[in-house]
């Protein structure tokens, strides 16, 4: 095994098949890892069974394989990690950094505040009624240096306030699970969509409370549809076809600012990926927040080759 100080990951939710937006993110994360001779892991964020789609996890993994984005090691499933999440919740409650919150959505709407007002702070023992568990935040800036977006600063008290780590229905919150799993998998570099930029200070906050290392972050532009909405299951993004992967990878590389030479459209999948890893430069990724998918989601017939990967 090659020893490298770089471990990256792609962490999709199995709520639907892989679409162009997720391929774009997966490719960038994969190339950044490979360019650093790093490990690249895949983790299924299956925390929310009602939102998940049967067979989607398998579907996503087959699509990644089809596109040549082969991961290292075993795929982790968050659904198997509840014991670890519960331990952290217990620790934060015990330390009185987390508290039980019985506020309803309606209660909070009535307050019309942007941030949770701290109503239930101090509730450290479980109430009779169902309660969410929130972690307390501070009125201090949290700073991190994003490899693409530059220096970022958030004040969580003013931007959302104490946030939920375990929901009233018993499901663990994304923020908690992602921080624990990134640490457990020794993730050093996270390349993901800019839609998660404002989650990052919450992750940094939890890392500090749980004494976990903070990885390096790079937040990519997201692909948007004609209405300017992020491609996602909610916006009915089409599944990425399991056809010739080369034109699709090529278009994603172009959108990532990597300028692949046109002759690579005739290359085989693995040659294209090898070129891309060798020439990968995060500095060339556009700094904008959104890229219109229409400009790249229809590789023309001239691009399609009959070569097999
Ligand atoms: Zn409350």
Image (tube, rainbow, N blue to C red):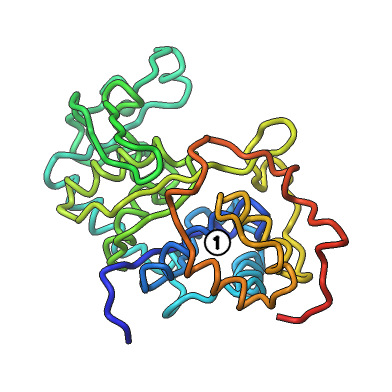
Residue 234 against residue 262 in the figure, above or below: above
Residue 259, percent across and down? 59, 55
- The one nearer the camera, 134 or 261, is 261
Which residue sits furthest left? 95
Q: Quadrant of the C terminus?
A: bottom right
Q: How many marks?
A: 1
Q: Give the image quarter of residue 114.
A: top left
Tell which quarter ligand 1 is in: top left
Which residue sits furthest bottom? 1
* Side of 192 where 217 appears, left or right: left
- The one nearer the camera, 12 or 66, is 66
Residue 261, percent across and down? 65, 62
Could you tell me which residue is drawn at 62 percent across and 39 percent down?
291
Which residue sits furthest right? 301
Could you tell me which residue is drawn at 19 percent across and 45 percent down?
93
Mark 1 residue crowding within 10 angstroms, few (<14) / some (14–19) / many (20+)? many
Q: Quadrant of the N terminus?
A: bottom left
Could you tell me which residue is drawn at 29 percent across and 35 percent down?
151
Residue 73, percent across and down? 42, 80
- The one nearer the camera, 181 or 85, is 181
Could you tell me which residue is drawn at 24 percent across and 45 percent down?
206
Residue 289, percent across and down? 52, 35
Residue behind label 1 places its C-beta within 8 angstroms of ligand 1: no
The residue wearing badge 1 is: 27
Residue 147 against residue 22 in the figure, above or below: above
Q: Give the image quarter of residue 110.
A: top left
* Side of 89 where 259 appears, left or right: right
Q: Secondary structure at mark 1?
A: helix
């Amino acid at each position: 095994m090659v020893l490298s100080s770089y471990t990256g990951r792609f962490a999709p939710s199995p709520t639907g098949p892989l679409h162009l937006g997720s391929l774009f993110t997966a490719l960038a994360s994969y190339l950044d890892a490979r360019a650093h001779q790093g490990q690249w892991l895949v983790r299924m964020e299956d925390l929310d069974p009602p939102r998940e789609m049967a067979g989607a996890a398998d579907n996503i993994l087959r699509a990644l394989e089809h596109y040549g984005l082969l991961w290292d090691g075993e795929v982790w499933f968050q659904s198997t990690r509840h014991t670890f999440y519960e331990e952290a919740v217990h620790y934060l409650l015990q330390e009185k950094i987390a508290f039980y919150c019985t506020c309803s959505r309606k209660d909070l709407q009535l307050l019309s505040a942007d941030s949770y007002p701290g109503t239930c702070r101090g509730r450290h023992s479980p109430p009779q009624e169902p309660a969410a568990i929130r972690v307390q935040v501070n009125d201090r800036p949290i700073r991190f240096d994003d490899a693409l977006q530059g220096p970022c600063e958030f004040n969580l008290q003013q931007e959302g306030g104490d946030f939920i780590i375990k929901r009233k229905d018993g499901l663990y919150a994304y923020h908690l699970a992602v921080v624990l799993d990134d640490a457990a998998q020794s993730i050093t570099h996270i390349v993901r969509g800019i839609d998660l930029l404002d989650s990052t200070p919450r992750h940094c906050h939890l890392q500090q409370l749980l004494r976990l290392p903070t990885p390096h972050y790079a937040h990519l532009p997201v692909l948007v549809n004609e209405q300017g909405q992020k491609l996602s299951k909610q916006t009915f993004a089409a599944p990425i076809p399991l056809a010739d992967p080369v034109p699709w990878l090529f278009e994603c590389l172009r959108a990532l600012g990597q300028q692949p030479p046109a002759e690579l459209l005739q290359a085989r999948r693995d040659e294209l990926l090898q070129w891309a890893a060798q020439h990968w430069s995060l500095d060339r990724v556009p700094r904008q927040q959104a890229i219109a998918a229409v400009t790249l989601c229809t590789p023309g017939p001239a691009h399609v080759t009959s070569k097999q990967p």
